[in-house]
Image: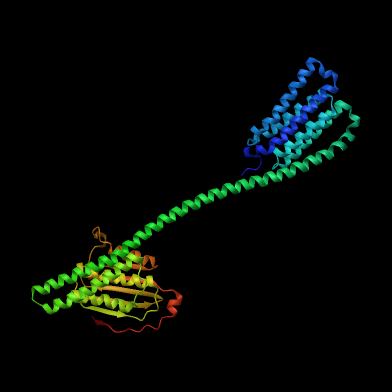
Amino acid sequence: MNTSSLPRSDARYERPFFIFLTLILIAMYVASIMGNPSLQAPLSLTIFTILMLVHLALHWSIFGIYNSPRWHLIYLILQGLLALPITYISGNIGMIFSLYLALIGESMGLLRDKKLSTVLMIGYYVLLTTLSYGLLNGWEGIPWALLSILPMILFVMIYVGLYNRQAKAREQAQTLAIELEKANQQLTEYAARVEDLTIVNERQRMARELHDTLSQGLAGLILQLEAADAHLAHNRTDKVQSIIGNAMVQARSTLADARRAIDDLRQSSLDDLESALRLEISRFTNATGIPILFHADLTPPLPGPVKETLIRAVAEALTNIANHAQAQNVAVDVRMKDKSLSVTIQDDGVGFDVSAIPFGHYGLLGIRERVRLANGSFEIRNESGTTLKIEIPMHAEQSASAVASSPKGEAPL
C-alpha cells in the first residue's frame, strides 16, 4: 500500500482539524479587519476577503488531492505564495503564525514518507515567515521572531509526527483487514475445491468398491453357473452339485461384501494376504478347472488398504482371465524384494490390446487407481499371454518386521 498519501477513508479523521483551522482563520480575518482600519476600505476589504476565501478553499480542496501525489508540492507552494500577500495586507503578526504553522502541519501530513521534500517545504515556510515578518515589522526584529516561532514549529512537527504514526498504523490495520478478508475468501474457495475433489474421489472409490464386490461377485457366479450348466448337459450331477455349492458360498460372500460396502464402503478387516489370495484362487479353479501355480513369500504385516488393493487386483485379473483369456495355465507370484512387495499374475492365453478395452469395463482402471493410491506401480505385458505386475513399496518399519523370505513351494491348486 502506498503510504505517501492518506486514503480517502481517512478524511473523517482530518475534518475536525480543518474545521478548527477554518474557525481560527475566520477569527484572524475578523481581528485583522478590526485592528487595521485601512482594511475597511471597500477595495482593500474585497481583495483581502477574496484572498482569504481562496486560501480557505484550497485548504478544503486537500481532500481531493490526497491520492494524487503529483499535486502535493504544487498545492503547498501555491498556498505559501498566497499566504505572503494575505499576511502583508492584514498587517497582523498573528496571521503570520496562523497561516504558516498550519501549512507546516499540512506539509508534514501530505509528505510524511518523503523526508527530503518535507524538510525543504518546512524551510520554504520558515523563509516565507521571515519575509512576512520583515515586511510588517522591519528586518531588525527577525532573530527574535525566529526564536519565538521555532518552539511553535517544533511543537507542530511533534504533534503532526505523532498523528502520522497513528494514521500509518490505522492504514496498516485497514490493509491487514483487507488482506485477511481476501485470505478468508481464498480459503472459502479452496474449501469448496477440496470438497469437490473429495466428492470426486469418493465417487471413484465407490465405483471401485461396487465393482470389486457386486460386479466381481456376480461375474464369478455367472461363470460358475455356466460351468454347472455345461456339466449338467453331460449328466455330471456330482460336479454340478459341487459347483452349485461353491456358487452358494460365493453368493453369500458377495452379499456380505455388498452389505459392508453399503455400510462403510470399506472392509473393516481382511484376512492375511496369502489366505485371501488362496481363497480367490480356489474359487477360480473350481469354476474354470484351470490350475494356478501359486507362490507366496512370507510378507510383513500390511496395512488394510494395501492388502485390499492386492486382493482386489488379483480377483479382477482372475475374472478377466476366466472371461477373456482362453488360457490353459495361470501363475500367481507374490515376492518381497528390495523393500517392495511384488505381485505378478501371468497366463498363457490370447492376450489383449490395452488401448482397445470396450467402454463399461472398469476393472483395469480400478486396479490402476488402487495401486496409485498405494504409491505403487502397475504394468501390463502381452507376450505369450498376458502378465500383470504390481509393485508396492513397503515402509521401513514394515520391511524391518518381515521375516526372511522363505518360499512356500509352488504347486498347482
Relative horizontal placement of residue 69, taking residue 286 as reference (left or right): right
Q: Residue furthest right?
A: 140
Relative horizontal placement of residue 222, taking residue 277 as reference (left or right): left
For the C terminus, the image quarter is bottom left
Name the spot of residue 338 as percent of width and height, x first.
40, 76
Q: Residue furthest top?
A: 42
Name the spot of residue 405 as percent of width and height, x first.
37, 82
Q: Nearer the viewer, residue 268 or 184?
A: 268
Name the spot of residue 343 as percent of width and height, x first.
32, 74
Image quadrant in which you'd find residue 89: top right
Relative horizontal placement of residue 161, taking residue 405 as reference (left or right): right
Q: Nearer the viewer, residue 390 or 287?
A: 287
**Number of on-image labels:** 0
Name the spot of residue 341 as percent of width and height, x first.
37, 75
Q: Residue furthest left?
A: 234
For the N terminus, the image quarter is top right
Image quadrant in which you'd find residue 271: bottom left
Relative horizontal placement of residue 154, taking residue 225 as reference (left or right): right
Q: Is residue 359 above or below residue 319?
A: above
The residue sitting at 78% across, 33% down in the picture is 100
Q: Is residue 78 above or below residue 175?
A: above
Q: Nearer the viewer, residue 119 or 401?
A: 401
The residue sitting at 79% across, 15% down in the picture is 42
Look at the image and tell me whether residue 326 can be seen. no
The residue sitting at 88% across, 27% down in the picture is 137
What colouring style does the render use?
rainbow
Look at the image and tell me whether residue 164 can be seen. yes
